Amino acid sequence: MPRRQPPAEPVWVSRLVMDAVHFDQLREHGGLAGLRDENTLEAVLARPKQRWHYDPASDLGTLAAAYGWGLVTTHPYRDGNKRTAFLAMVVFLGLNDCDLEATQEEVVTTMLAAAAGQVSEAALADWVRSHLVKLA
């Protein structure tokens, strides 16, 4: 019986891209620039990679939620963490030939609930999967 090939490694969001997304959000919407905790941001960026490494069958919704959940719950930036969290999920999905289609109201409600601890990481992953659209 032939061996099953492991899934291809996803394309990850780099620190440079994450910082650029954050800066762009501050430029557009205002807020305090800068990091609150650099180590926390590095841990957030490593979170989906570790999840994939230990469970290579993790789907894109789970990995996107790892970015979003990490950012929205640990607040590595001084301001704009919820906006950056949502866009980190969108950028990650885009890098992996997917998109997230949701209304602005759904996004705001979901990200506020996640920040308030009313939505678990698993529930956020379910939400991402329910709004995921394959592009290619």
Image (cartoon, rainbow, N blue to C red):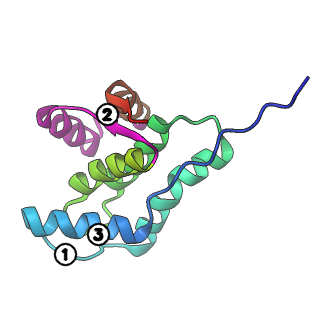
Q: Amino acid at mark 1?
A: Ala
Question: Quadrant of the image for the N terminus?
Answer: top right
Q: Which residues are magenta?
A: 96-121
Where disc 1 sits, the SS reads: loop
Q: Residue at x 34, y 53 (%)?
A: 88
Percent x, y of residue 130: 35, 24
Which callout, 1 or 2, points to the residue nearer the camera?
1
Task: Please tell me which residue lies in front, 130 or 134.
Answer: 134
Q: Residue at x 40, y 74 (%)?
A: 38
Q: Is residue 2 left or right of residue 46?
A: right
Where disc 3 sits, the SS reads: helix
Percent x, y of residue 111: 23, 42
Can residue 79 be seen here? The reply is no
Percent x, y of residue 127: 34, 29
Q: Amino acid at mark 3?
A: Ala
On the image, numbered disc 3 is attached to which residue? Answer: 20
Q: CA distance from mark 1 to mark 2?
A: 27 Å
Q: Residue at x 15, y 67 (%)?
A: 26
Q: Quadrant of residue 117?
A: top left
Where disc 2 sits, the SS reads: loop
On the image, numbered disc 2 is attached to which residue? Answer: 119
Q: Amino acid at mark 2?
A: Val
Closer to the N terminus: mark 1 or mark 2? 1
On the image, numbered disc 1 is attached to which residue? Answer: 33
Considering only vertical position in the picture, is 53 above or below 38?
Answer: above
Closer to the N terminus: mark 2 or mark 3? 3
Which callout, 2 or 3, points to the residue nearer the camera?
3
- Dots 1 and 2: beta carbons under 8 Å? no
